[in-house]
Image (cartoon, helix red, strand yellow):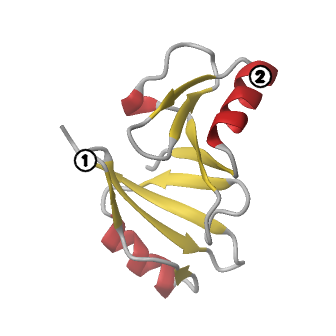
Amino acid sequence: MSRVKFELPADDLGRATAFYRDVFGWSAQQLPFDYVLVDTDGEPVDVADADGGISPRTEFVQGPVLIIEVPAIDAVASKVVEAGGTVLNAKERVGDYGFSQYVKDSEGTVLCLWESVQG
């Protein structure tokens, strides 16, 4: 079973963070790189269990993206290709938190695969 979270692209992380905090009451935590974790319940962000994030707009992240937590990105990326999807980038380390890799499903929807680093 996999968990699903979300990622929202932004041109200005501070402005986007303020928007979601002010409009919806979300809590946010800036990470030591260009990424903001958010929790939609307004409680302090649990870094290990945040609901989603706000990221800089990139080549792959142009609109909202579902983040799907998987046990092993390499194995799932292979399944994506076998099922008619496309791998968009190499697996990347994300600080001390885990690894991510962007893929497109068979219909062209961009998804982010997430593999947590077990502490």
What residue is disc 2 on?
24
Query: Could you say which quadrant of the image residue 83 lies in?
Result: bottom right
The three-letter amino acid code for the residue at tag 1 is Val
Q: Residue furthest top?
A: 43
Q: Residues within 10 Å of mark 1 (few under 14, many from 20)?
A: few
Q: Position of residue 26 (x, y in %)?
A: 66, 22
Q: Position of residue 25 (x, y in %)?
A: 72, 17
User: Relative to residue 74, is residue 37 depicted above or below?
Assistant: above
Disc 1 is placed on an element classified as loop
Counting every numbered tag in the picture gives: 2
What residue is disc 1 on?
117
Q: Residues within 10 Å of mark 2 (few under 14, many from 20)?
A: few
Q: Residue at x 61, y 48 (%)?
A: 7
The three-letter amino acid code for the residue at tag 2 is Phe
Query: Could you say which quadrant of the image residue 43 lies in?
Result: top right
Q: Position of residue 3 (x, y in %)?
A: 49, 45
Q: Residue furthest left?
A: 119
Q: Residue at x 64, y 56 (%)?
A: 65
Position of the C terminus, as image quadrant, is top left
Query: Could you say which quadrant of the image residue 60 lies in?
Result: bottom right
How far apart in space, not on screen, are marks 2 and 1 (Cα)?
30 Å
Which residue is more in the foreground, 107 or 45? 45
Q: Residue at x 57, y 82 (%)?
A: 85
Labels 2, 1: front one: 2
Q: Are marks 2 and 1 in contact (CB under 8 Å)?
A: no
Q: Position of residue 108 (x, y in %)?
A: 70, 77
User: Relative to residue 45, is residue 65 depicted above or below?
Assistant: below
Which residue is more in the foreground, 76 or 37? 37
Which residue is more in the foreground, 41 or 26? 26
Q: Earlier in the sequence, mark 2 or mark 1?
A: 2
Disc 2 is placed on an element classified as helix
